[in-house]
Amino acid sequence: MKIIGIGKNYVNSISEISAIKTGAQTIFTKPDSSLVTGNTDINFPKITNQLAYEVELVAKIGKRGKDITLDAAESYISELAVGIDYTAKDVLSASRENKGPWALAKGFDGASPVSAFQPVSNFTDLKAINFDLKINGEQKQVGTTGLMIYSFAEIVAYVSSFMTLEEGDLIFSGTPASGAGFVEKGDHLQASIEGELFLDFKMI
């Protein structure tokens, strides 16, 4: 099972998309050991003092595919969830100073909490899904897939041109353009899709 992340994939206004959309998507991978499920509380990682959160919708691949066409791409998504893509910002900054990769800053244990998945058939339009994140009861991020630069179908088609997608692979599809920030030990995170709470855990 692979965890694939999509970077910088949301705008604040649809009018921004045409100037940004070049076809070159920002892709990174995370190890499966970073995954946390079952709304399990997460130990604040010892490797960072700057833990940044990004709420994202997560697509699960339902069947194997390579060089998937854009028209067929949505049929490869079986389920959706909401998750947090954590980044150890200080670790990332240190790596960038030496032109290093994102791997350690994005791939530590606990870096990828994900809610229970819902069948994709529960969603009538993948381009009109609303989701949000609250921390300690305060709204921090609000997103809608209508503001994605690259749609789920475009992501699946693009990624599959480089690597075979396997059943069970997870794709973090990007975070809203506004509202990302830092968490601290003791924070309570709650993420919802269409107003229904799915992800609910604490940093301990």
Image: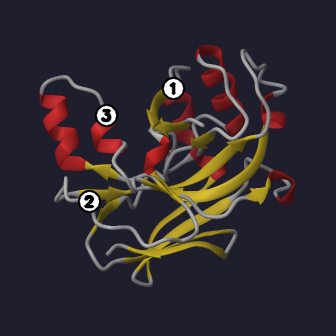
Quote the CA–CA distance across marks 2 and 3: 16 Å
Quote the CA–CA distance across marks 1 and 2: 29 Å
Label 3 is placed on what type of residue? Trp
Along the line of sight, the residue nearer the viewer: 143 or 38: 38
Query: Closer to the camera: disc 2 or disc 3?
Result: 2
Disc 1 secondary structure class = loop
Disc 2 secondary structure class = loop
Judged from this view, the residue extending furthest toward the bottom is: 137
- Residue hosting label 2: 45
- Residue hosting label 3: 102
Crowding around mark 2 (Cα neighbors within 10 Å: few <14, some 14 to 19, many 20+) is some
N-terminal of the two: label 3 or label 1? 1
From the top left corner, tell me how far across and down residue 24 is, in percent: 50, 20
From the top left corner, tell me how far across and down residue 83 is, in percent: 54, 58
Colour theme:
secondary structure
- For the point 70% across and 69% down, the residue is 194
Does 115 appear above or below 121?
below
Label 2 is placed on what type of residue? Pro
Query: Closer to the camera: disc 3 or disc 1?
Result: 3
Q: Quadrant of the N terminus?
A: top right
Label 1 is placed on what type of residue? Gln
**How many numbered tags mark residues here?**
3
From the top left corner, tell me how far across and down residue 190 is, in percent: 51, 75
Q: Are marks 2 and 3 in contact (CB under 8 Å)?
A: no
Does 113 appear above or below 107?
below
Rendered image quadrant of residue 171: top right
From the top left corner, tell me how far across and down residue 94 is, in percent: 13, 37
N-terminal of the two: label 1 or label 2? 1
Query: Closer to the camera: disc 1 or disc 2?
Result: 2
- Residue hosting label 1: 25
- For the point 70% across and 59% down, the residue is 117
